[in-house]
Image (cartoon, rainbow, N blue to C red):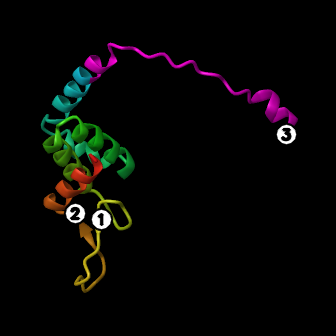
Amino acid sequence: MKLFRRLFRPTVVEVTVNHRAPERLIDAVDDLAAVFTRLGTAEAGGHFTCSEADAIARVLAVSGNEGVAIDWLCGHATDDEVDDMHHVYDEDDPEGEGRVMTDDEIAEYVAELAL
């Protein structure tokens, strides 16, 4: 334990506020949204975990790019499997295997993420 204490020394991080950040942040998010509208970008979503895909979708939705967020998650969800966040189960599913969320369900999901 003593060795751990010697090797692990918490670092104090000083936070500074950049008053220009909001304008620059808006520009950066707009650039991000533009990237996510390119053909094929949503399909890359399958290479992200559900939590990572949701975080990106939330940023896009909160910034007013709900349509882009929906397209992104639809692309991501196509590769979801059983027990993934965008895989749902229907009560009337006879085999109980579930399915990927529909576009409308993802739109509702994105609206909730943006709250």
In the rendered image, residue 37, in percent from the top left (x then y), is placed at: 14, 35
Q: Which of marks 2 and 3 is nearer the N terminus?
A: 3
Residue wearing tag 1? 87
Question: Which numbered circle lies on residue 1?
Answer: 3
CB within 8 Å, label 2 to label 3: no
Horizontal side of 10 relative to 57 (left or right) equals: right
Residue 37 in the image: above or below residue 104? above
Work out how far the residue at label 2 is from the one at label 3, CA to CA, in angstroms.
48 Å
In the rendered image, residue 60, in percent from the top left (x then y), is placed at: 23, 38
Work out how far the residue at label 2 is from the one at label 1, CA to CA, in angstroms.
6 Å
Camera-side residue of 8 and 62? 62
Camera-side residue of 43 and 59? 59
Horizontal side of 5 relative to 36 (left or right) equals: right
In the rendered image, residue 99, in percent from the top left (x then y), is placed at: 24, 69
Q: What residue type is labelled 1?
A: His
Residue wearing tag 2? 101
Q: In which quarter of the image is residue 84?
A: bottom left
Q: In which quarter of the image is residue 21?
A: top left
Work out how far the residue at label 1 is from the one at label 3, CA to CA, in angstroms.
44 Å
Horizontal side of 78 relative to 51 (left or right) equals: left
CB within 8 Å, label 2 to label 1: yes
Mark 2: secondary structure: loop
In the rendered image, residue 2, in percent from the top left (x then y), is placed at: 87, 35
Crowding near the residue tagged with mark 2, few <14, some 14–19, many ≥20 C-alpha atoms within 10 Å: many
| Stretch in magenta | 1-25
Q: Earlier in the sequence, mark 1 or mark 3?
A: 3
Question: Which numbered circle lies on residue 57?
Answer: none
Residue drawn 23% across and 29% down?
32
Residue 66 in the image: above or below residue 96? above
